[in-house]
Amino acid sequence: MAKKGKAEDSVDRIPKGLYEKELYALQAELVKLQEWVRNEGRRMVVVFEGRDAAGKGSAIKRVTQYLNPRVAGIVALPTPTDRQKTEWYFQRYVAELPAAGEIRLFDRSWYNRAGVERVMGFCTPDEYRRFLHQTPIFERLLIEDGIILRKYWFSVSDEEQEHRFRSRLRDPMRQWKLSPMDMESITRWEDYSRAKDEMLVHTDIPESPWYIIEGDDKRRARLNMIHHLLSSIPYFGDVRPPLDLPKRPEPTGYERPPRELSHYVPDYAAELLERKAEAGSKAD
């Protein structure tokens, strides 16, 4: 087991048992929120932004764990195509907005322009200034049209970020989470800090404020984020009508075709049990 980072040790960590119990209770409320959105025909957008390795992805995973993917969808757009680069900047994000009864969780969003594009020079100064001017207007239009919009910024200390990067480098199951751009975020820490500060000045507006999540303790960050989301929306739990299993009708003479006519997946689990039994007998 990897050692905890010093930054993570410095906070009062939530015990695992308490965390899991409270997370499950909050997830039960998220299901009620989902049903409220669906039944009332509401539209909800939740934006997840922040530092690399700050815990955005794991928070989204906990939010959606028990939700219906047909209602609560995750939006994680790739690099824009050459055609999309010539469109109005918000155009491809507009196409991902929810219809009635839907929730969309943006794993990074139009705020790419305020972060990586600004720091890495992927947009021009004019494009950046236009973004800062248009974003509050764009978000006010969404809200005026009835969309519930929440924006969360996940913060993490430089020490804890580096610890998480090193952990990913050692873990072959998570190395895919690292990219050259992530490595750049270490050497450009202060550039990203300045970009975030400027973004907040222009886009932290009364109608659509930014909510900051301290992410050095991932458990604490997930609980805080989900609890805040639930507390900020006046949803109510619909009373679902009780369901009873119907009585299975009597057989009418159907006969299943011979099993050998179908292609079955090989019983790999049975092989594992056989190997275990053989290993046990040899040990005896």
Image: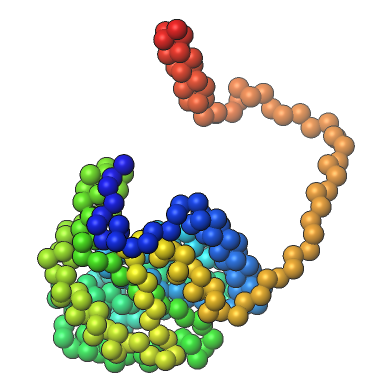
In the rendering, at what x and y percent does residue 177 appear?
Answer: 28, 54
In the rendering, at what x and y percent does residue 59 appear?
Answer: 42, 62
Compare residues 108 and 16 and report the one nearer the observer: 16
Viewport quadrant of the N terminus: top left
Q: Is residue 23 left or right of residue 254?
A: left
Task: Please tell me how many numbered marks the rendered image carries.
Answer: 0
Which quadrant would residue 159 be assigned to in this image? bottom left
Residue at 22% in and 89% down: 129
Residue at 16% in and 60% down: 183
Q: Is residue 148 above or below residue 257?
A: below
Considering every residue shown, the one lying at the far left of the view is 187
Residue at 25% in and 90% down: 130
Q: Is residue 19 left or right of residue 191?
A: right
Compare residues 79 and 193 and report the one nearer the observer: 193
In the rendering, at what x and y percent does residue 123 appear?
Answer: 18, 79
In the rendering, at what x and y percent does residue 128 appear?
Answer: 22, 85
Which quadrant would residue 33 be assigned to in this image? bottom right
Which quadrant would residue 115 be assigned to in this image? bottom left
Residue at 68% in and 71% down: 237
